[in-house]
Image (spheres, helix red, strand yellow):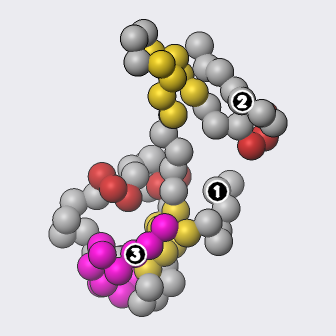
Amino acid sequence: MWLYRGNIQKAVAMMPMAGFGAIKAFEPQRWICSCSKYVYDPAKMDGIAFEELGKKWKCPSCGAKKKAFSKTNKYPLS
């Protein structure tokens, strides 16, 4: 059972866990490359979160290392 708090459009999904209280559901984040401005969107990458990518993953646009990326809210999730 999912619980919603506040406005349904801006709600944070919560899933109750026995003995642990409520835990936030996965909230996908977009990441942007500081070199090429490529935006990594987990929705377009089979739902794979940026944090789950391997250490050797590189920007497909410019080849920059993973540490060149930062979280962004500039491009809202669709």
Task: Quadrant for residue 51, please give it.
Answer: bottom left
Question: What is the x, y in percent for residue 72?
Answer: 55, 69
Q: Earlier in the sequence, mark 2 or mark 3?
A: 2
Question: What is the x, y in percent for residue 1?
Answer: 59, 13
Residue 69: which numbered mark, if any? 3
Closest to the camera, between mark 2 and mark 1, is 2
Observer-nearest residue: 15 or 76? 15
**Boundaries of the magenta span:** 60-71
State if disc 1 and disc 2 touch (CB < 8 Å). no
Question: Which residue position holds label 1?
Answer: 77
| Quadrant of the frame with the C terminus | bottom right
From mark 2 to mark 1, how far is it between C-alphas? 19 Å
Q: Earlier in the sequence, mark 2 or mark 1?
A: 2
Q: Is residue 44 visible?
A: no
Residue projecting furthest to the top: 18
Q: Is residue 73 visible?
A: yes
Q: Secondary structure at mark 2?
A: loop
Q: Residue at x 74, y 43 (%)?
A: 10
Q: Earlier in the sequence, mark 3 or mark 1?
A: 3
Question: Which residue position holds label 2?
Answer: 5
